[in-house]
Image (cartoon, helix red, strand yellow):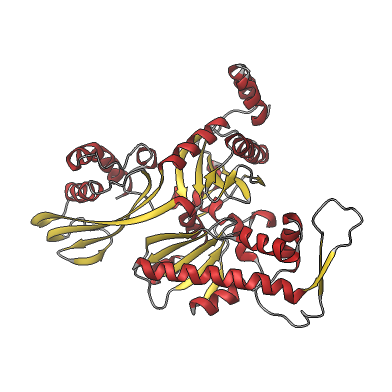
């Protein structure tokens, strides 16, 4: 019984009967972790069984992979609830069939178009004594009390660094002696309406949202090495509808930024420039596109189908140099705009920080070389290295976010509040600090017991 058939039965009021029949065929497997990537070009799902954990080298083995062309999603927004729910169900169903398991819930990665990051600082007095868990609780609660942004929903509450008596960069302040304890906290939020739409859309596919993860963070977890995070790095995730950046400094994520320009804009430029269809433009871009000049490009001819329904119309034929002249300015402009956004944010970026490119649009020939020229930094193409044994179709940069969601679930970085409880938090100005402190303290204590 397919998940799509279940959805139809639910509309007719027969979902309970269908669920009982499905449970007799495929039992729910405890400990299964499923990730769902809601991209503008594809919707993908990875499923990992409990035996897929490789703690020795912090890697995983994925048991099931499924992906379909994205429908109902554009620029990080749900624009057609029914179409998006159907695509989600199809992607998850394909992964379930490969893994031979059924999943109840998924951890969803969302593009950075609707996300924003905010840094908050807190400091508490501890007296001249060794710092205890209670002191950490008070510092975290003090920081969380400041997290009140209207019409926004938190998805990540990540500690950037601790400070003892003004000395920053402390990883674990417990048992250190000092008078004051400081905390820098990164809060990543998404639009409240988008949060509700995702919950409803995934629910229509008969799945539970277990967590929502920012796609640039997930891609960085999958693609970056530990040394890159420690020395400073910018992970640029080039999606179809947006280009996002996750900035790491001193081993921690310090900033998330987004530009609403992606690979689909390059495709649209080609379609306009060559007077071809979007499908034809995408094919030409994939097979012949490049962002840098190549030898003999003036003599190489590229063909694309014409627009319209005239079956007898000849294909459009242009030199490959014209195609490069369409692609390169758009990609270069994208990198330049992102570079200026990062400068304007004031985020600390190490002078020697490198850049790692992920996402489907990063696979276009010449993108890496163009990034080197714009950013004047070393650039490499990032893939989900800690997920071996993936088929070639799912092992590239386009699937970094999907793999990173599972890797982060197992190995961090962890939020200061469990994901399920973060999703119930509201960042409304009417929440008083005192109320916020009392309301969040139980979450803080639970997180500290599990992670510190």
Relative to 451, say whether 183 is above or below: below
Residue at 69%, 80% (x, y): give it.
293
Quadrant occupied by the N terminus: top right
Residue at 66%, 63% (x, y): give it.
269
Residue at 35%, 49% (x, y): give it.
415
Left/right placement of residue 156 relative to residue 435 reads right
Q: Residue furthest left?
A: 128
Left/right placement of residue 447 relative to residue 97 reads left
User: Measured from the top left, where is residue 447 in percent x and y?
Assistant: 31, 44
Query: Depth check: 450 or 428 in front?
Result: 428
User: Measured from the top left, where is residue 282 in percent x and y?
Assistant: 72, 59
User: Measured from the top left, where is residue 452 in percent x and y?
Assistant: 29, 50
Relative to 222, say whether 232 is above or below: below
Can see residue 412?
no
Relative to 262, say whether 39 is above or below: above
Query: Depth check: 358 or 295 in front?
Result: 295
Rendering quarter of residue 240 = bottom right
Residue at 56%, 34% (x, y): give it.
103
Rendering quarter of residue 323 = bottom right
Q: Residue furthest right?
A: 312
Can see residue 299?
yes
Query: Depth check: 125 or 282 in front?
Result: 282
Number of disc labels: 0
């Amino acid at each position: 019984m397919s998940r799509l058939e279940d959805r139809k039965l639910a509309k007719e009021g027969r979902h309970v009967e269908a669920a009982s029949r499905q449970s007799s065929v495929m039992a729910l497997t405890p400990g299964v972790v499923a990730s769902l990537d809601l991209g503008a070009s594809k919707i993908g799902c990875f499923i990992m069984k409990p035996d897929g954990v490789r703690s020795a080298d912090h890697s995983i083995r994925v048991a099931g992979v499924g992906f379909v062309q994205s429908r109902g999603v554009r620029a990080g927004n749900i624009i057609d609830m029914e179409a998006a729910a159907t695509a989600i169900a199809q992607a998850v169903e394909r992964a379930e069939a490969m893994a031979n398991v059924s999943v109840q819930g998924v951890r969803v990665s969302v593009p950075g178009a609707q996300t924003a990051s905010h840094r908050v600082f807190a400091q508490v007095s501890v007296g001249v004594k060794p710092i205890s868990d209670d002191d950490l609780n008070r510092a975290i609660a003090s920081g969380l009390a400041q997290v009140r942004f209207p019409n926004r929903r938190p998805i990540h509450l990540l500690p950037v660094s601790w400070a003892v008596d003004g000395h920053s960069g402390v990883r674990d302040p417990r048992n250190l002696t000092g008078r004051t304890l400081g905390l820098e906290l990164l809060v990543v939020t998404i639009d409240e309406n988008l949060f509700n739409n995702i919950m409803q859309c995934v629910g229509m596919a008969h799945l539970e949202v277990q967590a929502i993860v920012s796609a640039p963070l997930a891609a960085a977890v999958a693609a970056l090495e530990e040394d890159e995070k420690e020395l400073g790095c910018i992970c640029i995730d080039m999606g179809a509808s947006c280009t996002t950046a996750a900035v790491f400094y001193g081993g921690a994520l310090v900033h998330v930024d987004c530009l609403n320009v992606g690979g689909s804009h390059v495709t649209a430029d080609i379609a306009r420039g060559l007077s071809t269809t979007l499908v034809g433009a995408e094919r030409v871009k994939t097979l012949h596109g490049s962002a840098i000049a190549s030898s003999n490009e003036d003599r190489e001819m590229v063909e694309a189908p014409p627009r319209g329904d005239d079956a007898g119309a000849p294909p459009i034929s242009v030199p490959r140099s014209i195609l490069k002249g369409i692609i390169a300015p758009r990609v270069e402009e994208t990198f330049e705009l992102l570079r200026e956004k990062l400068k304007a944010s004031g985020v600390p970026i190490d002078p020697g920080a490198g850049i790692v490119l992920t996402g489907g649009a990063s696979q276009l020939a010449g993108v890496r070389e163009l990034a080197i020229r714009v950013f004047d930094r070393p650039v490499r193409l990032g893939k989900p290295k800690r997920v071996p044994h993936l088929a070639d179709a799912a092992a590239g940069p386009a699937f970094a976010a999907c793999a990173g969601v599972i890797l982060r679930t197992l190995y961090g970085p962890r939020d200061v509040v469990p994901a399920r409880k973060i999703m119930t938090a509201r960042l409304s100005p009417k929440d008083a600090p005192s109320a916020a402190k009392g309301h969040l303290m139980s979450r803080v204590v639970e997180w500290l017991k599990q992670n510190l």
